[in-house]
Image (spheres, rainbow, N blue to C red):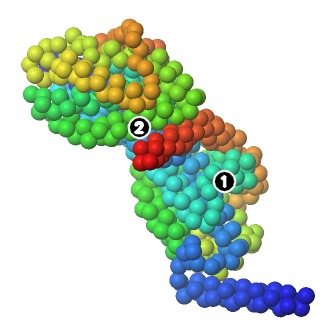
Amino acid sequence: MISFCTFTIQIMGMEKDMEQLFQEKIDKEIRIEPKDWMPEKYRQTLIRQISQHAHSEIVGMLPEGNWITRAPNLRRKAILLAKVQDEAGHGLYLYSAAETLGISRDEMYEQLHSGKAKYSSIFNYPTLSWADMGAIGWLVDGAAIMNQVPLCRSSFGPYARAMVRVCKEESFHQRQGFEILLTLSRGTEAQRRMAQDSINRWWWPSIMMFGPKDDESPNTIQSMKWKIKRFTNDELRQKFVDICAEQIKILNLTIPDPDLKWNEEKGHYDFGAINWDEFWQVIAGNGPCNKQRLDARKKAWEEGAWVREAATAHAAKRAQRLAEKRA
Amino acid sequence: MNASLINYTLHLADNALTIGHRNSEWCGHGPVLEQDIAISNIALDGIGQARNFYQYAASLSGNGATEDTLAYLRDVIDYKNLLITELPNGDWAQTTLRQFLFSTYQYFFYQQLEKSTDRQLAAIAEKSLKEVTYHVRWSSEWVIRLGDGTEESHKRLSNAVTELWNYTGELFIPASYEKELIATGIAVDLSVIQPLWQQKVSNVFSEATIAIPDKSFAQQGGKEGIHTEHLGYILAEMQFLQRAYPGAEW
Ligand SMILES: [Fe+2]
Ligand SMILES: [Fe+2]
Ligand SMILES: [Fe+2]
């Protein structure tokens, strides 16, 4: 009995040392690699964050995929298709990064399909016009970049490296989106109307992409200590608003916020109140497209089951034939 | 002669665009993430090839034609693609089989077109051949995998063969505008590539344990502007913005 107790205490003592060591590495900006010791909570937080990010890339293909077959000219069609394909690639890098933490891609899909895992709420809004391809690129990819550039310095090596590749492509996405809006803004009256309507619909959801206010984001402190997160939600949101408030001038359109105003004293733009009720409703599943998006993912997965089974069966047959030949 | 060359170039462009458009419908809905990327890539190649051919056709046409007026402002009657390229995707078996049948055709076709006396067509063929070589490899692997996979995949592939086979005859029937260009060495002599295509298809089918149908009837007309009902819907969707907002820049 006694020896058992000492043993436990020793283990706990070791765990504490390990955790201290771990934090020291983090503080010294030494990357954590999959084989390194890490606190269970760190591992779980990362699995949640990376898989959620991967799911966002994959679900994010749907609203833009909605316009590939209707793109207005061949150049735009090719760019949009390439862009949506990039998002699939991002999903792939991120699923691979998450897999290094001991979860399989199939398990992550299951969590997505069952609703256990979340994805970015922004993709639960519909794409109603071609201008939405512009607004998504400019605002949604723009907000994603703001969130993701700091993740290139994430303390977890595989995530940081995946993000370096992702961010390079995201900046191209953002530019092509802005260019779509710029073209529309210099076009006909109908095109300007299309562009303004799109910004009206995408502005606030994009602002919400940075997540709840800092005082309602309980995980932020730990995540910052672990350097999984480098800036708070509100810091990033402010940066984003400051940039967009300048860029909208080039478009000669308006951001749908009467309270958006330069604040000389703060050196930042002030902006209006966010409708947090809408934010929580969409997270709870009541966005305009939550069901549609998840159904589309589940349908692709279920209808692909026989294809994946066939590939596995064929690979097994080949391996067996090869073994027989050798014997 | 110039009219025939324009029609022939449009035929090649329309082939590449319609199959590219169809494949792009898979983007975001593929059975495996890696394959979603692969089919989107093949779709992109198709659209890229189409643009090269349309740009050339536009330069031959003059009159302010551009790649986009040709793709977006012609109706069904003027589209000259092979019928097989406009058929709906069906399931993964039908999509990959269609790709295999068509890419194999395109592969031997571009090999000949590289030798065309028309330097522009030859250059586009040369550029496209690298892409098509990959398409043939990718799609033949899928045909083999599905044919020699599970009972269900075998059945689905067989169904796809039944569905598509009657559309393969058209690949080798020259259109009116094509015949005179074959005589001058501009267009590909289809009778040269037919046996090559048959050989390759029969090899891959045998590895896939799938029989080549012994009877077939060649559905045709696409090259002359007589299409299936499907093309009208492709164009309605694809051309929507250009038609709804005439003259706008995008
Ligand atoms: Fe992305
Ligand atoms: Fe992203
Ligand atoms: Fe993106």
* Position of B204 relative to B87 (above/below): below
Query: Which residue lies under the disc numbered 2?
Result: B141
Mark 2 element type: helix
* Residue A206 visible in the snapshot: no
- Disc 2 residue lies near ligand 1 with CB under 8 A: no
Q: Residues within 10 Å of mark 1 (few under 14, many from 20)?
A: few
Most foreground residue, B241 or A209: A209
Q: Residues within 10 Å of mark 2 (few under 14, many from 20)?
A: some
Query: What's under tag 2, amino acid-wise?
Result: Glu
Residue under mark 1: which chain is it in? A
Residue depicted at 85% across the width and 87% down the height:
A4
Using the image, tell me which numbered label, if any, was put on residue A107: 1
Circles 2 and 1 on the same subunit: no
* Position of B33 relative to B141 (above/below): below
Residue depicted at 44% across the width and 53% down the height:
A173
Most foreground residue, A275 or B100: B100
